[in-house]
Image: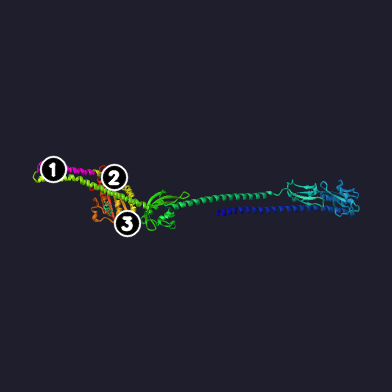
Amino acid sequence: MRFRRWDILSLVPLATIVALVALVGTLVWILARADAERARSKLATDALWVEQTLRFQLAVDEDMLVRLALDGASGTPMETLQARARLHIAANPEMLSIQWFDRDGRLAASVPRGVGPAGGGLIDTLLRSSATTARPVYGTAVAGIAPMAVRRSDGDGGLIVAAMSLPMMLDRHVPWWIAEQYAVRISDASTTLADRARRPVAQGAPFHTISFDPPLAGTSLTITAYDRPAAFGNAALFGAIIALAAFAVVALLIVQRNALHRRRAEERLRAEMAFRRSMEESLTVGLRAKDHSGRILYVNAAFCKLVGLPASDLVGRLPPMPYWSQDAVKETLDRQKQLATGPALPQSFESRFRRSDGTEIDVQVYEAPLIDASGRHRGWMGSVIDITDAKRSARTARAQEESLARTGRLVTMGEMASTLAHELNQPLGAIASYAAGGLNLIEAGQTDSPLLRTAFEKLALQARRAGLIIRRIQDFVKKREPQLVPLDLAEVAADAMGLMAGEAREFRARLVLDVPEPAPGPVLADRILIEQVMVNLIRNAIEAMATGPRSGDQLTIRLRTEGAMLRLDVADQGPGIPADLSEQLYDPFTTTKSHGMGMGLNICRSIVELLHGSLSHAPNPGGGTVFTVRLPLAATDPAPGTARPYALSDGKQP
Ligand code: ADP
């Protein structure tokens, strides 16, 4: 239906062009006709003008002839009449001659003299008739000469005849401005009697004919324009109109074709949009587009569902967003700033969202540059996946793993302890009994008895055995030698923080690394061991902040140079450490946690001391605890390889 209406509408410009062309064509045709009409009426007027002029001249000639006849009757001598005739001929050369004939048709006098009798059949006809014509009568023109006769009134009954030259008349009496425009012709039914033309007449040129009878029987006067009317102007105009119309139609067709292409492209685009929209709506991944200022440009249904807010509450909104978790506001604003200024590279990170119902969810966000049609980077398109369940199961798995490992460790330690007990039991029992035997001998005064000597020898043997058992266990525990290399502790700290980031987010602790400019120099240490120390201290701090009352959510890892030492602080804002616990903190198996082993700090101190450093703790000003590791800087450190072996079981090693 829509297309049909469009098709009809598309015909309107075409119809308008056709109507316009028809209108302009009609106007031009009417104007051309009016022009032709004007030209025709001018031709007729000019023809009339010529006819009147010629008639007037003939009337003058006729008057002359009549006067000669009348004057002859009133007795004017013939010489006088002839003199007057001569004068008239001189003034009017179209009159070739004037001749007097008697009643028998004989030539009585002629002006000019010596000219042959003119008039032909006219004289006989007139002489035979008895009519007394007051006005001259014209005879048939032959070879352009027309005779004109009047009856003499002097009683003789003869005639006065004048020979009129028609060509001469045209030459003399057609006005020049007529001659410039037209060829003038006097003709009878079959022949041209007189003709005046400046140049040949074009075929088909317009002409006008009027009858010249009277005075000359059977003749007509024709004036003909030299040229055909200029058809070019109209033809050119018509041609231009047709060409313009054709051009307009072609342009219209091109426009319509373009419109058709455009419409098809729009249809394709609509289909594509619908496809993409349904695809986006069917996605379980939340999609969110934002510009560089962080304003939300678009969200899909999955995103709305994820945060529990309708699209109308989100689109057009500027940060901070209602779905940002309170704990993640600063971190998210920082990231927003970094996205606005940093390079347009895809980025992936974890964050926390707060749904409209107050529940918090963990999300994985993947930010990709949002590029517009002109290739400009307009903002960011973020894909957001709810990873709360995945994290929960990972957490559960980790907890299970840890508990398994802990159990494993306890079992191992238990086994080790029972093996130790069992293995040591024997030599210790033997030592005890040899010692008792020895004591008995001494008490009996047999101090020089060879028996006493044998008892002491066996006692020493059993003691060596017990020592051997202990060394074997030491060898078992001491699995590896530490690898001492110069280490940038800022880098190691960043790695340790990366390892603990998930746990920190889970317990809403914000990890901050505070390294001065320039960074402290390297220390000689075993990367794995020192990382283990940091991970232990960070985990303790996170757990402390998660369980007790906290004064803040910040966990600062601070690096400072102190003379020849490097100081590493792990400062939390947790509940702090009670004074009674503070003393035994580094003793093995000291723990306040249900799942704790109480070995962490003990092992940490062993490692730090192995690296010629120290581990201590103090209350954190403003709440919480600061654990401080001090290690010698590499320049003042003993050469690598001089470190003593490190034993997990012995926290008191120097
Ligand atoms: P565990 O972590 O297995 O308990 P540790 O030796 O690492 O063993 O820690 C011993 C005890 O020290 C902990 O149970 C805890 O009570 C206390 N502790 C350690 N670090 C902190 C801290 N940052 N804030 C408060 N108490 C702490």
Name the residue type under label 3. Answer: Gly
* SS type, badge 1: helix
Per the model, the C-alpha gap separating discs 2 and 3 is 33 Å
- Nearer the observer, disc 1 or disc 3? 1
Point out residue 123 in the picture as x, y percentages from the top left corner: 88, 49
Q: Which residue is mark 1?
A: 455
Name the residue type under label 1. Answer: Ala
Query: 212 and 544: which one is in front?
Result: 544
Q: In the visual, does 287 lie left or right of 138? A: left
Query: 339 and 123: which one is in front?
Result: 339
| Crowd class of label 2 (few under 14; some 14 to 19; many from 20; radius 10 Å) | some
Q: Considering only order in the chain, which callout, 3 or 1, is on the residue closer to the N terminus?
A: 1
* SS type, badge 2: loop
Point out residue 590 in the picture as x, y percentages from the top left corner: 24, 52
Q: Considering only order in the chain, which callout, 2 or 1, is on the residue closer to the N terminus?
A: 1
Q: Residues at badges 1 and 3 in contact (C-beta under 8 Å)?
A: no
| Res 553 label | none
User: For the magenta stretch, what is the residue range?
Assistant: 447-474
Q: Which residue is mark 3?
A: 552
* SS type, badge 3: loop
Q: Residues at badges 1 and 2 in contact (C-beta under 8 Å)?
A: no
Q: Which residue is mark 2?
A: 526
